[in-house]
């Protein structure tokens, strides 16, 4: 695998389910990000991890819980989601938080 | 407040025509500047970046961008558009001082007519 990978690519979940999104970067970077991309809305930064520590949490509801066990892996744990949480969730990585970011293909999440 | 503006939501050009996508930013100091492209169902891909130095930067796929400090702009250009360039284009800036701040514009969707 090369670059940034995300699994699953598609996810349908009910509002009472618990699921997790996984991101893995194979670039040796030290920063990772979660973004939410909804139709007709700007790209929303959710979380930033630098050197495995969370450095940014953009007022994201607690039903989204990130985890960064090491510099190569990033998870987004989901529980009790709402239909408005349906979106494309993108993961990215970079070498330093002010450098160009490399994105994964995203997970298309549908909450029913 | 810091911001990034892409004034054009949609742009349509004919294949072979030239292209310019606009990006304006509002920051106290010169930020780092980026252009990304997103094809349908995909993540974003870096086209080019500006950190310092020569204000005209070359990127992949034949794109270039020019940083104009006096206009707080970083417009993306391509002399001859190909049908495969149809995608959404995002300008992004990151503050070079103080706390971390990475902001994306709202995007410009490019349609290419055959």
Image: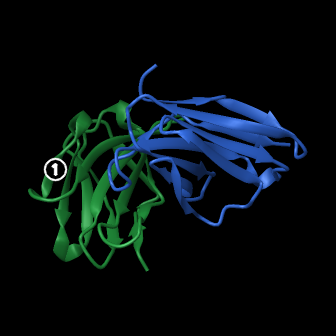
Chain colours: A blue, B green
Question: Horizontal and vertical percent for residue B109?
Answer: 45, 49
Q: How crowded is mark 1: few (under 14 residues within 10 Å), some or many (20 or more)?
A: some
- The one nearer the camera, B61 or A21, is A21
Quarter of the image for the C terminus of chain A: give it: top right
Question: Horizontal and vertical percent for residue A12?
Answer: 79, 35
Q: Mark 1 points at which residue?
A: B57
Q: What is the residue that sits farthest to the right in this orientation?
A: A16
Q: Mark 1 lies on which chain?
A: B
In the rendered structure, the answer to whether residue B24 lies left or right of residue A37 reads left
Name the residue rendered at 53%, 42% in the picture: A91
In the rendered structure, the answer to whether residue B43 lies left or right of residue A59 reads left
Rendered view: A89 above or below B91: above
Residue B87 visible somewhere in the drawing: no
Question: Horizontal and vertical percent for residue A51?
Answer: 45, 48
Name the residue rendered at 34%, 56% in the picture: A98
Question: Horizontal and vertical percent for residue A22?
Answer: 63, 34
Residue B11 visible somewhere in the drawing: yes
Name the residue rendered at 63%, 40% in the picture: A75
- The one nearer the camera, A53 or B63, is A53
Label 1: element kind: strand
Rendered view: B33 above or below A18: below
Q: What is the residue that sits farthest to the top in this orientation?
A: A1
């Amino acid at each position: 695998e090369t670059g940034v990978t995300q699994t699953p690519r598609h996810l349908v979940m009910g509002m009472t389910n618990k699921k997790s999104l996984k991101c893995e970067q194979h670039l040796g970077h030290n920063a990772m990000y979660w973004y939410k991309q909804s139709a007709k809305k700007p790209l929303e930064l959710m979380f930033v991890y630098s050197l495995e520590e969370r450095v940014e949490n953009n007022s994201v509801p607690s039903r989204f819980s990130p985890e960064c066990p090491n510099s190569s892996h990033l998870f987004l744990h989901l529980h009790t989601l709402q239909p408005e949480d349906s979106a494309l969730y993108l993961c990215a990585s970079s070498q330093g938080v002010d450098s160009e970011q490399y994105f994964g293909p995203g997970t298309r999440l549908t909450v029913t | 407040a810091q911001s990034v503006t892409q004034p054009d939501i949609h742009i349509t050009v004919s294949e072979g025509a030239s292209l310019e996508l606009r990006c304006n930013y509002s920051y106290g100091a010169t930020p780092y500047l980026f252009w990304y492209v997103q094809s349908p169902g995909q993540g974003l891909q870096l086209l080019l970046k500006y950190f310092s130095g020569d204000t005209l930067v070359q990127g992949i796929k034949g794109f270039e961008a020019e940083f104009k400090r006096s206009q707080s702009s970083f417009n993306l250009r391509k002399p001859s558009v190909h049908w495969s360039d149809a995608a959404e284009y995002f300008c992004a800036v990151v503050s070079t001082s103080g706390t971390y701040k990475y902001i994306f514009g709202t995007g410009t969707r490019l349609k290419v007519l055959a």
